[in-house]
Amino acid sequence: MTIEISEEYKASLIPFPKETLEPLNLPKETFEFLTEVGFPLHARYEITPNAPLTFFDIPYIKRHAHLQNTFLDIASMDMMGELTIDIKTQEVYQIQKGCADRRGNSVEIPVFANDSIGQFIDCLGIWLSFYQQFRDEVDRNLAINPKFSLFEHKEMYEPILNKLKEIDPESVKWRKYFWRRMCEPDIL
């Protein structure tokens, strides 16, 4: 299995015009990344079954009701929530919708993904390289053995875990973190 960021993926990264993002007063590192590198042009990346990832045409600032900091919302993952950048720390989070509080507001649960947007974009590129090959390998194993279970073959995730760790060691440190969670057998 070859796991590397493809040239096609790199070519799909489209920077934002500076004048579009200047009014948001973003931290320098985030602003520079978004205006020099940008996001993938393609919408609805399948990163896991039934959870397409779609980057917004223009990211926007949002205050989340139950979270302290201000966030820059960058993408939707349908039922899996949204991706956002904490403006203060510049870390990337998945915001999951939890149960409603007593006022009826949906509680939002931040799940750490990466230390920076650059690391997230690189991890996504690596994941997209891995994911289809991984699904094909699982399908081959199921064709040979209909009782095949990823729960008994967690070693199949080692190559992607190692690549993610190279990009951002923190991203796979804890099982509850976004990328580490993507490498759990119940996700596929």
Image: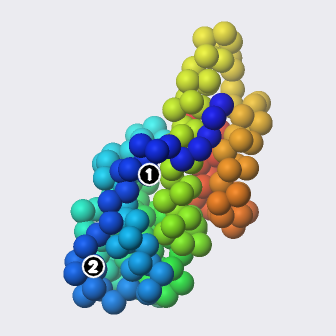
Task: Determine if residue 104 is in view.
Answer: no
Whether residue 71 is situated above or below residue 15 in the rendered picture: below
Depth order, front residue of 59/68: 59
> Is the C terminus in the top left, top right, bottom left or bottom right quadrant?
top right
Residue at the image point whose x is 37% and y is 60% from the top:
39
Image coordinates of residue 114 in percent, x first then y, are 58, 67
Residue at the image point whose x is 56% and y is 64% from the top:
119
Depth order, front residue of 118/134: 118
Chosen colour scheme: rainbow
Whether residue 184 is situated above or below residue 138 in the rendered picture: below
**Residue 152 as seen in the image, left or right of residue 83:** right
Depth order, front residue of 157/185: 157
Residue at the image point whose x is 51% and y is 32% from the top:
132
Q: Element at badge 2?
A: helix
Q: In the rendered image, which residue does mark 1 sit on?
A: 10
Residue at the image point whose x is 22% and y is 81% from the top:
19
Image coordinates of residue 65 in percent, x first then y, are 38, 81
Image quadrant assignment for residue 17: bottom left
Image coordinates of residue 161 in percent, x first then y, are 70, 49
Report the disc number at residue 65. none
Crowd band around label 2 with a 10 angstrom C-alpha radius: few (<14), some (14–19), many (20+): few
Instruction: Answer whether labels 1 and 2 touch (C-beta < 8 Å).
Output: no
Q: In the rendered image, which residue does mark 2 sit on?
A: 18
Task: Determine if residue 56 is in view.
Answer: yes
Q: Earlier in the sequence, mark 1 or mark 2?
A: 1
> Is the N terminus in the top left, top right, bottom left or bottom right quadrant?
top right
| Amino acid type, label 1 | Lys
Image coordinates of residue 42 in percent, x first then y, are 32, 48
Distance from Cα at disc 1 to Cα at disc 2 = 20 Å
Whether residue 119 is situated above or below residue 65 in the rendered picture: above
Q: Element at badge 1?
A: helix
